Amino acid sequence: MKIFKSSLNLKLKLILLCIGSIIALGTWFYTQNIVNKLQKREKEIVELYAKSLEYITGSTTTVETDLTFIFQNIIQRIDFPLILTDQNHQIVSTEDGIGYKNIKLKKGLSKKQILSILNKKLDELSKQHTPIAVKTPDGKIIQYLYYGDSEIIEKLKYYPYLQIIFAIFFLLIAYTSFNYIRKNEQSSIWVGMSKETAHQLGTPISSLLGWNEILRMNYNNPDKVLDISEEIQNDLNRLNKITKRFSKIGSQPELKEESPYEIIQKVVHYFERRIPQIGKNVSISISGEKDVKAKINSELFEWVIENLIKNSLDAIETKEGKIDFIISSTKKFIAIEITDTGKGIEQNKKKEIFKPGYSTKKRGWGLGLSLSKRIIENYHNGKIYLKESIPNKVTTFRILLKK
């Protein structure tokens, strides 16, 4: 069982890792596709600029008019670094908007300092993209346009990496948090199980102590001694059952054809002799179909019935009350309804009653119904749920077992 759980956990981790990798790669490819499209668009703008300069070279109109047209319709729309050189790759001008564009320079620099900075930038741009040649109508190269990536492209390039880093950081926080929560839950479950064990042992041990006192008082009455001896044997049998119950948790129990009516009757009989000790006058009745049978593990099924009876006894806060079991069947299922006249369950708590840790008792540990659900649904392939609860009137749980 432990090997199976370990293998399952490993598979889940690998699946999550694969999903995370697919998301990361998908993001990277998607972003790179956008970057490539933007770079293509910027290249087209530079090529248009180059064509415009070529047009000026062979144009019959005034150069001033053509430069104004280029400046208003092309240069103003460029938002990426651009440097214009002659055919020998020498920068044509140190004036912004003529020799270069979108390169941040400090104010007050001399032409020599600007030229030095632009030459360094020229080397950077040549590594990013191949410069575009400006040619005369006869094909002679007269200028080169060096260009780089715009600010938005630079940001998009790093975006997927930042996203992956943030995702890894988030996963680490989530993993640490889940581990912390899981450890706390495991700690709570262990505490709850230890208390449940003490609770399970407490009833028969208290009874044994009580029977021992009664035995001392009636040692010279043979009939009374035999009756007490029988009850002591019942408590010893119960202790043995408790041991078997806990040994079956975590393993698949053996199911046999059993009568739910007979099992419930045994549990009811055990409680009937001990209810007066808690200072209440609560009657427990069983009605319905006696002969129907289902595949049951008797030790674990008794545990469920005991938990439901204990919950009902705790819910009945008055000195008198009733707990009724009704057994019915259909072609596929055996239905067992447990109704008590206790304080009931609040509307907003109905979805939480089967969760570990839920309890209406001040000193409760909230494992009874959670264990009952696990036993019925995981081990018996059945179902248990709250059918009805009217505060201070009636509460009904329903168990469905397959035939």
Image (spheres, helix red, strand yellow):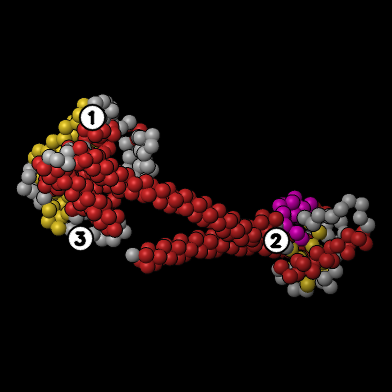
User: Which quadrant of the structure image shows residue 143?
Assistant: bottom right
Secondary structure, magenta segment, majority class = helix
- Judging by the rendered image, the residue that carries numbered circle 2 is 149
Question: Which structural element holds mark 2?
Answer: loop
Neighbours of disc 1 within 10 Å: few (<14), some (14-19), many (20+): some
Question: Which structural element holds mark 3?
Answer: loop
Q: Quadrant of the N terminus?
A: bottom left
Q: Residue at x 27, y 42 (%)?
A: 209
Please name the amino acid that badge 1 sits on.
Lys
Residue 72 visible in the snapshot:
yes
Q: Disc 1 and disc 3: Cα gap in Å?
A: 37 Å
Q: Residue at x 33, y 40 (%)?
A: 353
Image vertical order of residue 150 relative to residue 202, above or below: below
- The tag earlier along the polypeptide, 2 or 3, is 2
Along the horizontal axis of the image, is 85 left or right of 298?
A: right
- Judging by the rendered image, the residue that carries numbered circle 3 is 254
Q: Residue at x 7, y 43 (%)?
A: 289
Question: Which structural element holds mark 1?
Answer: loop
Q: Disc 1 and disc 2: Cα gap in Å?
A: 85 Å
Along the horizontal axis of the image, is 198 left or right of 389?
A: right
Q: Are marks 1 and 2 in contact (CB under 8 Å)?
A: no
Q: Position of residue 116 (x, y in %)?
A: 88, 64
Q: Which residues are magenta?
A: 66-82
Q: Position of residue 388 (x, y in %)?
A: 23, 34
Name the residue nearer the viewer: 353 or 127: 353
Along the horizontal axis of the image, is 99 left or right of 223?
A: right
Along the horizontal axis of the image, is 380 left or right of 353?
A: left
Residue 399 visible in the snapshot:
no
Please name the amino acid that badge 2 sits on.
Asp
Please name the amino acid that badge 3 sits on.
Glu
- Judging by the rendered image, the residue that carries numbered circle 1 is 280
